[in-house]
Amino acid sequence: MVYTLLGMSEQALQNESITRKPGAFEKRIHEIDFIRGLLIGLVVMDHLFCFLMIFSQGWKGGAGIYKVTSFYWNHDVRQIVRFLALIGFCFVSGVSTAFSKNNWIRAAQMLAIAAILAVVSNLGTMFLAKPLNLSTLSINFNIIAVLAWSTLFYCFFQKGGWRVVIIGVLVMFLLSWFLYPHLVSYVEEKELVVHIPALFRPTYPDSNADWLPLFPFIFFFFAGAYFSELFYLPERKSLIKKRGNWERPLCFMGRHSLIIYGVHVIVIIGVLSLLNIFLGK
């Protein structure tokens, strides 16, 4: 009845649905986008709570916000969820990277983004951290850098199929849980941290919440790529049936997670800085 009032017959509506080209939600493996969207949502929430905790200390009536956000930020559950979310991010990124045929370009693009984030965030620390009452804004090696280097190393294994990829998984496992811990002990004993590139630093001198070591997270990336080789390639079909349109927002976030990651902190700080003008003591 509604469509008739709009001047569309039921037959015309059916024809339109048949001829309409499927969008990204229909063509892509939706559970990968869904999980990645959920994870990037957790990242945004985590950073939002962090900056709310910092800014609310200078707001009139901000004690309640500070109490809630500081409770969240300092709770042990957050540390567990954060670690699991990072594992999930690396695993899902490995799954989706296995689909791509131009991972050299993808790795170069992400390395460029990681470098830009490092330069811009360090400039932010120099000129904005003090006015915003922040100790640092620096992002010198984080999840984007981990995924970029993981993708780059994966390029050397991808063409060999699942048999070669499993070798990569075993190599990264040995590096992450055997060689790397010995490197950590040696570096800390010899106090050589400042002489090791950030890529291989076991600890970071000016550590912040976004800094990540490459190991062991590269192992979870390779594990995701191996999972993809076994269960998604070559058919590239979803393993889980779509549940409905309510998945679309998270899938959209998952498809654009890199953009969201790159801009969300800027947006959060910008909005809270404006609020600071009106709510500041």
Image: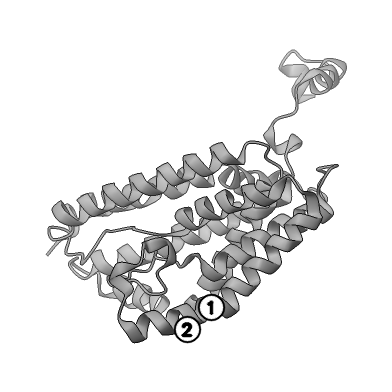
Q: Mark 1–mark 2 contact, CB under 8 Å?
A: yes
**Residue shown at 62% from the left, 60% from the top:** 221
Residue 212 in which image quadrant: bottom left
Question: Which quadrant is home to the C terminus?
Answer: bottom left
Q: CA distance from mark 1 to mark 2?
A: 7 Å
The residue where tag 1 is placed is 80
The circle on residue 76 is 2
Q: 4 or 224, which lies in front?
A: 224
Query: Residue 57 placed where, x, y %?
Result: 21, 71
Whether residue 240 is visible here, answered yes or no, is: no
Query: Residue 271 placed where, x, y %?
Result: 29, 49
Please give left or right for residue 107 compared with residue 2 in the image. left
Q: How is the image coloured?
A: one colour
Q: Within 10 Å of the Cα at label 1, are there few (<14), some (14-19), or many (20+) other Cα atoms? A: few
Please give left or right for residue 14 compared with residue 281 in the image. right
Residue type at mark 1: give it: Ile
**Residue shown at 32% from the left, 48% from the top:** 266
Q: Secondary structure at mark 1?
A: helix
**Residue shown at 56% from the left, 55% from the top:** 150
The circle on residue 47 is none
Query: Residue 64 placed where, x, y %?
Result: 30, 74
Residue 26 in which image quadrant: top right
Query: Residue 188 placed where, x, y %?
Result: 36, 83
Position of residue 78 relative to residue 5, above or below, is below
Residue type at mark 2: give it: Asp
Q: Secondary structure at mark 2?
A: helix
Please give left or right for residue 210 compared with residue 191 in the image. right
